Image (cartoon, rainbow, N blue to C red):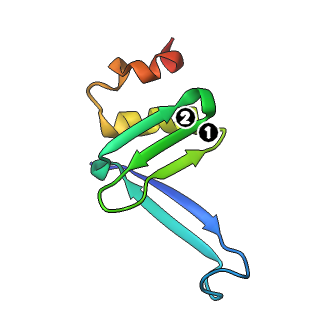
Amino acid sequence: MDRALSLLGQTSSDSWHRSVRHLLLSFWFSGVQEFYPELDAWHLTMVWPGVAPLRLSVLAAPYLTVHAARAIMPDRWTDDPRLHSLLA
């Protein structure tokens, strides 16, 4: 089963389309081509084909990194050296 990261955003009154107040975006982990956790900076960057990279800079970055890693590489996420600081 494929998993997704869904983000809910709110647009300003000066947005590209005045009738849109809220926006729900889903990013499917099965399409991720590149995955860059930057835990020291509280960032997680993921790349899908044909679109700009998605960079999340939030306090929940460590949680999202583990969630994404488990979905992207379920059999080997615990072996990823970039995640060792979370698993120690």
In this picture, is 22 found above or below 64?
below
Q: Quadrant of residue 43?
A: top right
Relative to 3, is 59 on the left or the right?
A: right
Whether tag 1 and tag 2 are in contact, CB under 8 A, the answer is: yes
Residue at (46, 32) in percent of width and height: 66
Local crowd size for mark 1, using a 10 Å CA cut-off: few (<14), some (14–19), many (≥20):
few
- The picture places residue 55, in percent across and down from the top left corner, at 52, 48
Relative to 79, is 83 on the left or the right?
A: right
Q: Quadrant of residue 82?
A: top left
- The picture places residue 49, in percent across and down from the top left corner, at 29, 57
Q: Quadrant of residue 13?
A: bottom right
Relative to 6, is 49 on the left or the right?
A: left
Residue farthest toward the right in the current orientation of the protein: 13
Name the amino acid, label 1.
Ala
Q: Which mark is residue 3?
A: none
Local crowd size for mark 2, using a 10 Å CA cut-off: few (<14), some (14–19), many (≥20):
few
- The picture places residue 15, in percent across and down from the top left corner, at 66, 80
Residue at (45, 22) in percent of width and height: 83
Q: Where does label 1 land, which residue?
A: 60
Name the amino acid, label 2.
Tyr
For the residue pair 1 and 36, the one nearer the viewer reads as 36
In this picture, is 39 found above or below 68?
above
- Gap in angstroms between the C-alphas marked 1 and 2: 5 Å
Residue at (61, 35) in percent of width and height: 42
Q: Give SS at disc 1.
A: loop
Residue at (36, 22) in percent of width and height: 80
Q: Which mark is residue 63?
A: 2
